[in-house]
Amino acid sequence: MIGAVIRFIVSALVLMVVSFLIPGFRIAGFINALLASIVIAIIGYLMERIFGGKVTPSARGIIGFLTAAVVIYLVQFLIPTMRVSIIGALLASLIIGIADMFIPTELR
């Protein structure tokens, strides 16, 4: 349980850093970033269940990268303080993928 809480906190911090670095990706405040990380995890889980394990960002392929970008783009419609352009979603997916190599947000 504590591992899941830490995972979401780290994910929220990564989203806030991405919001600072990427034009076209904005999220207001830590609580909204935390909510967005939870929603991203839920949508990512649902997409993995529907399409199989090949669409996860951990697959590190182009399909996983594009799926992560689509998930990030769709979350803006569920979190009112989050605004993401298509280019912003692609860049955010890239930055989050790079950050995940150094700061893993998966429970191992």
Image: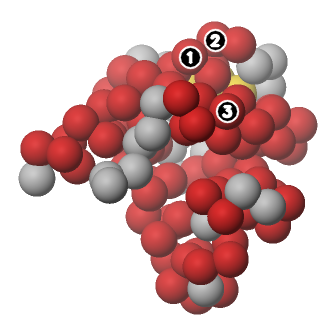
| Residue 31 sits above or below residue 4 on the image | above
Q: Is residue 48 left or right of residue 37?
A: right
User: In this rendering, does residue 102 appear at all?
Assistant: yes
Kind of residue sitting beneath label 2: Phe
**Which numbered disc, 1 or 3, marks the residue closer to the eye?**
3
- Secondary structure category for the residue under label 2: helix
Contact check, label 1 and label 2, Cβ < 8 Å? yes
Q: CA distance from mark 1 to mark 2?
A: 5 Å
The front one of 7 and 59 is 59
Residue where numbered disc 2 is placed = 20
Residue 8 place in picture, x, y as percent: 32, 40
Question: Where the C terminus falls, by quadrant?
Answer: bottom left
* Residue name at image x 37 percent, y 21 percent: 30
Q: Is residue 64 left or right of residue 57?
A: right
Q: CA distance from mark 1 to mark 3?
A: 12 Å
| Residue 7 sits above or below residue 10 on the image | below
Residue where numbered disc 3 is placed = 98
The front one of 28 and 97 is 97
- Secondary structure category for the residue under label 3: helix
Kind of residue sitting beneath label 3: Ile
Residue placed furthest toward the top? 20
Mark 2 vs mark 3: which is more N-terminal?
2
**Which numbered disc, 2 or 3, marks the residue closer to the eye?**
3
Residue where numbered disc 1 is placed = 17
Residue placed furthest toward the left? 1
Quarter residue 91 falls in:
top right
Q: CA distance from mark 2 to mark 3?
A: 16 Å
